[in-house]
Image (tube, grey):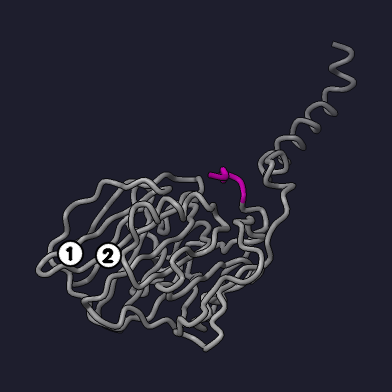
Amino acid sequence: MEYLTTYGWAIIIIAIAVATLYSLGVFNSNFFSAKATAGSCQVSRPYGPNTLEYISLQGVCSGEEPQYVAQFNGAGSYISTSANFPTSNTESFTVSAWIYIAGPCEADGTFYCGVVDADNGAEGWGLMAGTTDADFWTDAGHDVEFAVPQKQWVNLLVTYAPSGTSSVVDAYIDGKEATVGSPPSITLPMPFTLQIGEARQSSDMTFNGFISNVQLYNTSLSANTALALYDEGIGGAPIELENLVGWWQLNGNADDYSGNGYNGNANSVKYSSGWYTGYTQP
């Protein structure tokens, strides 16, 4: 008792300090690993944006973890880009992003938070994530919902392929195909302007959490490619360069590293260096 009386406060302070360091991820092995800076890996297009001749990856592109990720606060933070895609309502596409859902985007938690969203001023499509599941939707079609884990890093990938009077939508969580409903015919009025971290229709639907490594393709990627992208990890580079439209690493800025020049403008977005809590390298 005399010992506890004398040293009890010191023990409590040490315990609090250890708990604080743990919550900050200091005891996570990722804390000590070298982190890639923005643009250390990027796509080279010698003949300019949207060309394919001699396209290649340049730099260190072996999946190094990013130094920063984008943090959205659920209250009006977002990134708008100059990407106008797709350009035809018969065009397939794929969108991939690493996300960490920290909480609901609205106080009641009943609405989805925008991850990648697009519209043309009247109608649009969006990849959303809520507190229980994720959702791919269009104004002119049908929502496709699928479960997604909370408060941990996951790779979220959705492919869209129009097919006659119907559409094919596939969703993948960490490279594994998710169970989705069969959507009816989806007509997408084009083109759209892309936005990251918020649904363009409502500032109440801002993502609450972290987003990294957003990739957009002009094709419906295969299941094997979806798995390969996940296996590369949160710092992984695009795989099918000839179909790559945009690559927003969000590693300290909103620039597009696809070589197509679709740089983003960030509004109230922070970049976190302590992002790796809840992340496990595949």
Q: Nearer the viewer, residue 204 or 35?
A: 35
Q: For mark 2, what is the residue?
A: 160
What kind of secondary structure does the magenta stretch mostly adopt?
loop
Q: Are marks 1 and 2 in contact (CB under 8 Å)?
A: yes
Q: Which residues are magenta?
A: 276-282
Mark 2 nearby-residue class (10 Å; few <14, some 14–19, many ≥20): many
Secondary element type, mark 2 = strand
Secondary element type, mark 1 = strand
Q: Which residue is pictured at 62% across the width and 72% down the height?
A: 58
* Residue found at the very far bottom of the displayed protein: 47
281 displayed left or right of 217: right
Quadrant assignment for the N terminus: top right
Q: Nearer the viewer, residue 104 or 152?
A: 152
8 displayed left or right of 32: right
| Relative to 36, residue 25 above or below | above
Q: Which residue is pictured at 85% across the width and 28% down the height?
A: 10
* Residue 129 percent coordinates (x, y): 38, 56
106 in the magenta segment: no
Q: Nearer the viewer, residue 41 or 210?
A: 41
Q: For mark 1, what is the residue?
A: 167
Answer yes or no: is residue 141 visible: yes
Name the residue type under label 1. Ser
Q: Which residue is pictured at 31% across the width and 64% down the height?
A: 220
* Residue 59 percent coordinates (x, y): 66, 69
The numbered mark, 1 or 2, whose residue comes first in the sequence reads 2
* Residue found at the very far front of the displayed protein: 54
